[in-house]
Image (spheres, helix red, strand yellow):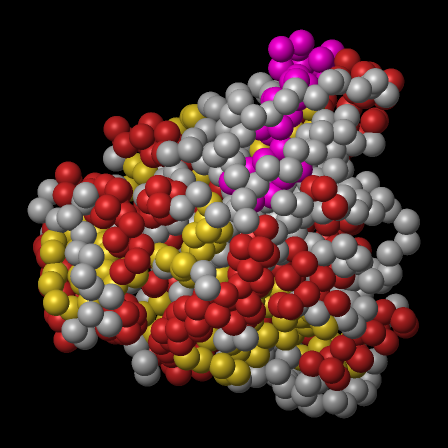
Amino acid sequence: MLRLRRSEAGDTGRGLGMTGTAGGGPERVAPSSVEELAKVLKSATEEQRVVNVVGGGTRQGYGSPPPPDLVLETSGLAGIEEWDPDDLTVTVGAGTQVAELEAALAERSQTAVLPEVPGRSTVGGVVSAGVSSLRRARLLGTRERMLEVRLVTGDGRMIRGGGRVVKNVSGYDLPRLVVGAFGSLGVITSVCLKLWPIPPASATVTIDDIEASQHVTRPLAVLERRGVIEVFLWGTPEEVAASSGRLDGVAVEGLRWPPDPQGAYRWSVRVPPASTSAAVGRLPTGWDYLAVHGAGDIRAASADSDGADGLRDWVESSGGALVVMDAPDGELDGLDPWGSPPPGLEVQRRLISQFDPGRVINPGRLAGGL
Amino acid sequence: MNLRIRLANNRSFAGSIQRPHLPQLPSSFVSLVGDLRHVLSEDRVLEEPVELYLYSRDASLMQGQATCVVFPHTTEEVADVVRVAERHGIPIVARGAGTGLAAGAIPVDGGIVLSTTAMNQIDIDVANRTAWVGAGVINLDLSKEAEPFGLTFAPDPSSQSACTIGGNVANNSGGAHCLAEGATTSHVLGLEVVLAGGETLVVGGQAPDMPGLDLKGLMVGSEGTLGVVTRALVRLLPIEADVRTLLLDFEELEGATRTVSEVIASGLVPAALEIMDQKMTTAVENWLRAGLPCDCAAILLAEVVGEPEAVEAEAALISRIGRANGARDVKVARDEAERAILWKGRKSAFGAVAQVSPNYYLHDTVVPRSRLVETMEEVQAIADRYGLDVYNVFHAGDGNLHPLMAFDASDPVMMDKVHKAGEEMVAACLSRGGALSGEHGIGLEKRDMMRADFTELDLDAQARLKEAFDPDGIFNPAKVLPEGSRCFDFGGVRREIPDGAWV
């Protein structure tokens, strides 16, 4: 039986700078430079102190890591380092808030295609947790934004992978490997992301039947929540008007993105795209949900965990995963946060040990207890 | 086996190879071939000198040395071959069609060349728009198989009628249409791989974000150095409702590149934006008679896809931006036949140069798109300095250059100039914030240039990553990372490149 507890780090205040906290909680550090961060990690490895990394603190519910000795805040590594709109690339510090980045990019009609309703999420946090945009069926997920990553390994080495151009095959693909790795390869300090231009027109069309969405070849998104189905369109005014006409629904101008459902328990249901509707039908009674059609990505929330076991059996047998994103303090009786261990645990373990030899960053947080 | 045939000009090998008298084979070799024939069959292990010669090359100018060539049919057989190789301490070099330009598929100092061509099953899942595809399936064959279902495989390297999916996965291949859709890695959802010890894994899957480290993503672009990919689960895209293909010609190259930038700044990401300079256009036109204008500095091939109303408006927009930047003429393909001719012209560019010159050598580098024009000017200046002919064809939307030098390799002085000029061109791109390779890979060709882009610590991390998968260095050794990348190298086999392996 695995214990699942909310990391203490996620609940406490922010902006404490370099000070440690009194009263037995973990020490909190907010390095203001990569070099400083490297020193912190090097000594953490030497002293075998367990480190948790916090950006906006919105994704602390994943996995079941042990309580940390040290909480590393990335707030000191924020800001846009380099952005040339003509190149459709931007390099940002890991601690930059997604909302701030997207607002800056939007001024030049560009987007990094990160989550639309990010709250306090940071770029580094979204990348580490592998969270993707609702536009993923059309523009693909966060991993496809990654062009370059700079990270500090568990033992304090400052390394880089990839490059600041939109196309690159030079060595192993570290930029994509860190997506969803929860810091197991190191603490991300900055990333270069591929941008997408925001076209002049957009619309949100409510339709009655999911089948109607087939009338548009490749919509920006088709979302479903509590029986409401919305098709999101963007493009030239001609394209949006034509697609909107084909859908025969109720159209409003602009993109009205819904937030992820909220509840004591939050879940991520991942299934083959064609099984999205079936998975929605299998959600236990009372679960709130937001389904991204065409991507097999369903975000759900519930008051309790009843029915999760049965849902997981079905999801896994159809080739997917049911992941716990957040749960109240305490135990999730018998429910592993990730489900069945993924294949290749041994090679993953060897890989992690090359980057975090002391296994100090978020140990045990990854699937399979890695 | 000591077979090092140094022959730079691949057009003249036929008939000119003397079959070397087979030397006394060491007993370990006999048992290697015997062991391989035991797990495969007699006829699926090649060891004749001519066969070994052919499989010691790829589409680069380099020459390796194969010990034997094997043709497994199944993943289990690949695992068997890996175990035999480990027992004999001999490397494995996986090979698709051998169209790679960076010498990624040549056995450097002996090794088993594992041809994937017999693993060519395609299994399409229409509802999920995915397909499980054998590593040996030819890229274009996949799209042909998918077409009746209204689906297509987006990555389309110029060599797509010959190159294999396994090779695409190994090199994270791109192509003209990866501007809007991304390169191979964006279209690989899962992989079946054979790792060290013959361990077989299926990683990734149809569902998104499968828990655990993204091993599948790491295998893509790893050039066969981490294991052998036997099957790939790929994403298929719906064929768009409509398409417009435009050809614009410019009196100044800068007009073409500025058009590319302004089109993207307008909020439009076309399916493709390709530029050819005058020299390349002329070579293609002389060969194919595609009706390309040869009296302009550059042509821009643009393609937009989507709903019929949309492509009409987008084509008009590109045309307008082009004319504002000095386009003399804008031709829109009227039907599929005209479109096919335009694309044939673009995709035959390298072949066209082969018609006018005995050899060519091209680099594949990337610069930020905003620095295309100045980079092109410097590439031309470098070529002029060495007295070389340079032809240009490039994925303008991505800033991905392919400067191509035409020459006669039988002249050793020329060969040396080409290599030096090539290195300067790569350096010119790196100094502008570019990358070593956009889509062809590092292979053997560029591995020593990796030091120009990455620090010792960066390369050490990459070497550690390789070690985690392949501690004994069995899989495609000497590729991607320069020798001595591992900063604190204790033990492990170091395989030097023999002098004779280079051409």
The image quadrant that residue B301 belongs to is bottom left
**Over which residues does the magenta segment extend?**
B35-64
Residue A99 x %, y % = 44, 78
Task: Please tell me which residue lies in front, B256 or B89.
Answer: B256
Identify the residue at horizontal 49%, vertical 38% (top origin): B99
**Whether residue B250 can be seen here:** yes
Identify the residue at horizontal 48%, vertical 70% (top origin): B385
The image quadrant that residue A282 belongs to is top left
User: Where is the N terminus of chain B found, in terms of image quarters?
Assistant: top right
The image quadrant that residue B325 belongs to is bottom left
Identify the residue at horizontal 32%, vertical 38% (top origin): B152
Q: Is residue A33 left or right of residue B391?
A: right
In this rendering, the answer to whether B295 lies above or below A79 is above
Task: Please tell me which residue lies in front, A219 or B138.
Answer: B138
Is B58 magenta? The answer is yes
In this rendering, the answer to whether A58 lies above or below B28 is below
Q: Residue furthest top?
A: B42
